[in-house]
Image (cartoon, grey):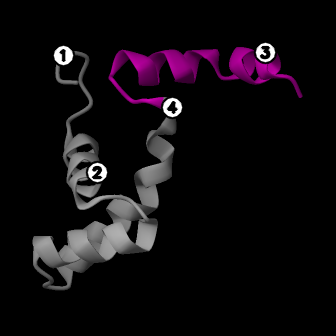
Amino acid sequence: MTVFEILSFNKELLRRLCDVGVKADDYRYVDLFRDYTKMIDNGHKATYAVAVLAEKYSISERKVYSVIRHLRTDCTTSSV
């Protein structure tokens, strides 16, 4: 399958995602966000959760905070 074929097949979905501010590489952080919400639900402090996840996913704590803030954003055309 070529890049063109993938883009053509998923054109509508990709357009909608782009319209609401979702970046193509946001998929990389779905597991991180899921882990973060589980840790918070289990009573861990946000600072601890961020430190653990930064280590686990080999990214900076600042990036973890940025990802969490971005993935919490409402998906409306004017909000992102």
Residue under label 2: 63
Marks 3 & 1, CB-CB < 8 Å contact:
no
Q: Upstream in the sequence, badge 2 or badge 1?
A: 2
Q: Upstream in the sequence, badge 4 or badge 1?
A: 4
Between disc 2 and disc 3, the foreground one is 2
Separation of disc 2 and disc 1 at Cα?
Answer: 23 Å
Between disc 4 and disc 1, the foreground one is 4
Residue 8 quadrant: top right
Between disc 4 and disc 2, the foreground one is 2
The amino acid sitting under disc 1 is Ser
Separation of disc 3 and disc 4 at Cα?
Answer: 16 Å
| Residue 57 falls left or right of residue 73 | right
Considering the numbered disc 3 on the image, is that residue within a helix, a strand or a loop? helix
Answer above or below: position of 25 versus 35: above
User: Residue at horizontal 28%, vertical 51%?
Assistant: 63
| Residue 4 disc label | 3
* The magenta segment: 1-23
Marks 4 & 2, CB-CB < 8 Å contact:
no
Quick one: label 1, few (<14), some, or many (20+) residues within 10 Å?
Answer: few
Residue under label 4: 24
Residue 60, position as x, y percentages in the image? 30, 58
Q: Upstream in the sequence, badge 4 or badge 2?
A: 4
